Image: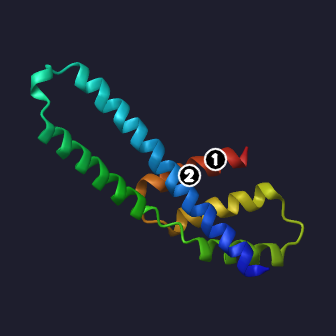
Amino acid sequence: MENKELSNVVANMELFKKENTQILRKNINNEISSYRKSLPIETISDDLEFQIENEVSNKLSEFNNGIDLKPTALYYSLKSEVELNENISEKELTYSAYDFLEKTTRSKFLKKILKELKRETKK
């Protein structure tokens, strides 16, 4: 049973990364589209389009690889908290998860998001 739970955690983390990468790509594409409207049409060549797409893809790949959520460590951290306190609430466990992730990630962007999520969870 434990391996199934762990594989669910890992799958959810991967889904989180994929969804956020897609959201970022959409937002970037919207910004690029807005910027293009202000440029004369002749300044946008196929080569420039290709370079922009490559750069966006590279940066999104870096972002995705920088999301170091460590799902296995998170799983065991939360599992040990439940073992120590069987009456822990879902809210407390969620806060614990955000705290663990904030402490273990190297991504400044992700740290900011997690810090905000912790504040919202405390309310």
Label 2: which secondary element: helix
Q: Is residue 31 left or right of residue 23?
A: left
Could you say which quadrant of the image residue 99 lies in? bottom right
**Is 20 situated above or below 86?**
above
Tag 1 and tag 2, C-beta contact below 8 Å: yes
Looking at the image, is 116 positioned above or below residue 105? above
Q: Quadrant of residue 61?
A: bottom left
> Marks 1 and 2, how far apart in space?
6 Å
Q: Position of residue 41 (x, y in %)?
A: 15, 21
Mark 2, residues whose alpha carbon is within 10 Å: few (<14), some, or many (≥20)? Answer: some
The circle drawn on residue 119 is 1
User: Which amino acid type is shown beneath numbered disc 1?
Assistant: Arg
- Say few, some or many: other residues with alpha carbon within 10 Å of mark 1 (under 14 / 14 to 19 / 20 or more): few
Color scheme of the displayed model? rainbow
Rendered view: 90 above or below 26: below
Residue under the image location 80 percent in, 80 percent down? 1
> Is 33 positioned to the left or the right of 50 in the image?
right
The residue at the point 40 percent across, 43 percent down is: 25
The location of residue 79, given as percent across then percent down, is 75, 75
The residue depicted at 76 percent of the width and 80 percent of the height is: 2
Question: The C terminus appears in which quarter of the rendering?
Answer: top right
Secondary structure beneath label 1? helix
Q: Is residue 94 left or right of residue 41?
A: right
Q: Which dot marks residue 115?
A: 2
